Image (cartoon, rainbow, N blue to C red):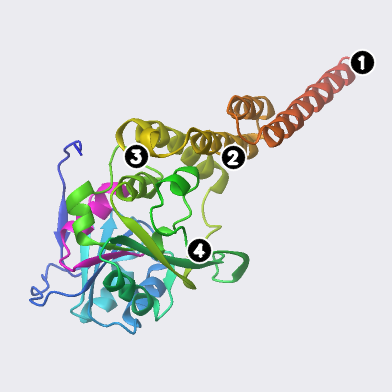
Amino acid sequence: MAQASRPVRLSLHRPGGLCHQPPVTMTPSVSVVMAARNYARFLPQAVESVLTQTVTDWELVIVDDGSSDDTPAAARPFLADRRVRYVRADRLGQPRAKNLGVGLTRGEFVAFLDADDIWHPAKLERQLPLFTANPGVGVVHCGRAVIDEAGRPVDRSAPAGPRGRVLAPLFVYNSVCFSSVVVRRRVFEHVGGFDPVWDLAIDYDFWLRVARHYEFDGVDEELVLYRTGHGNLSKKLSDRVATALSIMHRAEGRYGVAETVPAAVRDEAYASTCRTMGYVMRGAEPLAAAGWYGRALARRAGRFTSLKGLASCLVRAARRRSAGSAENATENI
C-alpha cells in the first residue's frame, strides 16, 4: 500500500532530558504500542495496566505525538522499567504514530492500547493461547466495559467481535475495540500498516484488509476498560461515519468485498451507516439528516427504519420552520 511520504521528527529519550535509554537486547513475545497526544491525565493508568499484566514478556513503546500537555512528565516515572520506551514525535497523526510504534517494536505479536483506556491484568494471558491454537488467526480481540472520563462504570458494554472469516460482518459494523486487539506481526508485513489517508476509522480500514486474508478470534470477557465522554462525540461520530463510507467504497473495489460479501449484506452496511449519520444530525440539522435517511432508503435493507427516521426528520424541520415563522410574526407586531 503506497503511503504519502512525510519527514518525521522524533527523539527517543527520557522526557525532560537528553539521556538515551540503553538498547534492550531481548526480543519480547508481545510489543505494546501506545500512541498518545495530550492524554497526560489518563496515561499513568494505561501504562500501569500494562505493568500489571500476568504475562511479563512484553515491551511498551509510548509514542507521544506532539503533546502540548504534561505527557512527557506523566511518562517519565515508568522509564525506570527497561521494557518501557518513550518516543517524542512531531504531530504525525494517529495512523503514522501507530505505524512508527509498530516499526520500533520487535515482538511476534503487537498489541494496541489507547492512552485513555485500561487493560485487565489477565488480558494478554487470555488472548495469546488463541494464536497457538490456530495458526490462521491474525487478530485476537476481547470484550470491553465502558467507563466515563472520571473512570466510573457506564451501563454499556460490548462483547468480543466476530470470529473466523469476518469480512462480511465487519463490513456491516466495526465491532472490534481497538484497545482490545493483539495482532500477529506478519499481518503488518503482509497487508501493510495503518493508511495515513484516513484521519479517523483507521482501524476499520485495517481490519477489512486483514479480514480478507486472516481469521479473527476473541475472548468472551471484558478485559478492556474503554473510556468515553471526554471529546466532541457527536462531531467525531459524524466525521467517522463519513470516513467509513469512503472506506467502504474503496473496500468494495480493492479488498475483495464486492466479490465475497453478498449484495444484500453490502446494502445493509451502507443503509445502517447512512442511518447513523441521519441519527447524529437529526437534532441540529434535520433537513440534512433527512437526506441521509433518504440515501439509506435507496438501499434494499431496513427500509421501514429508514422511512421512520426520514419522517421524523421532516417533522422536526417543519416544526422548526413553523416556530421560526411565528417568532418573526411576533417581532413584526
Position of residue 167 measured from the top left corner of the image (x, y, whole percent): 40, 47
Residue sitting at 16 percent across and 54 percent down?
A: 10
Q: CA distance from mark 4 to mark 2?
A: 21 Å
Tell me whether the residue at label 4 lies in contact with that at label 2, contact meaning CB atoms closer than 8 angstroms.
no
Position of residue 53 measured from the top left corner of the image (x, y, whole percent): 34, 81
Q: Which residue is mark 3?
A: 198
Q: Nearer the viewer, residue 182 or 75?
A: 182
Q: Nearer the viewer, residue 88 or 82?
A: 82
Q: Nearer the viewer, mark 2 or mark 3?
A: 2
Tell me which numbered mark, 4 or 2, is placed earlier along the sequence.
4
What's under tag 1, amino acid-wise?
Answer: Ile
Tell me which numbered mark, 1 or 2, is placed earlier along the sequence.
2
Tell me whether the residue at label 1 lies in contact with that at label 3, contact meaning CB atoms closer than 8 angstroms.
no
Tell me which corner region of the image, top left, top right, bottom left or bottom right, holds residue 214. Answer: bottom left
What's under tag 4, amino acid-wise?
Answer: Arg
Q: Which residue is mark 4?
A: 227
Tell me which numbered mark, 1 or 3, is placed earlier along the sequence.
3
Tell me whether the residue at label 1 lies in contact with that at label 2, contact meaning CB atoms closer than 8 angstroms.
no
Tell me which corner region of the image, top left, top right, bottom left or bottom right, holds residue 205. Answer: top left
Residue 276, numbered circle: 2
State the SS at label 3. loop
Q: Nearer the viewer, mark 1 or mark 3?
A: 3
Q: Which residue is mark 1?
A: 333
Label 4 environment density (alpha carbons within 10 Å; few <14, some 14–19, many ≥20):
many
Query: In the image, is residue 197 above or below residue 60?
Result: above
Label 2 environment density (alpha carbons within 10 Å; few <14, some 14–19, many ≥20):
some
Q: Which residues are magenta?
A: 89-113
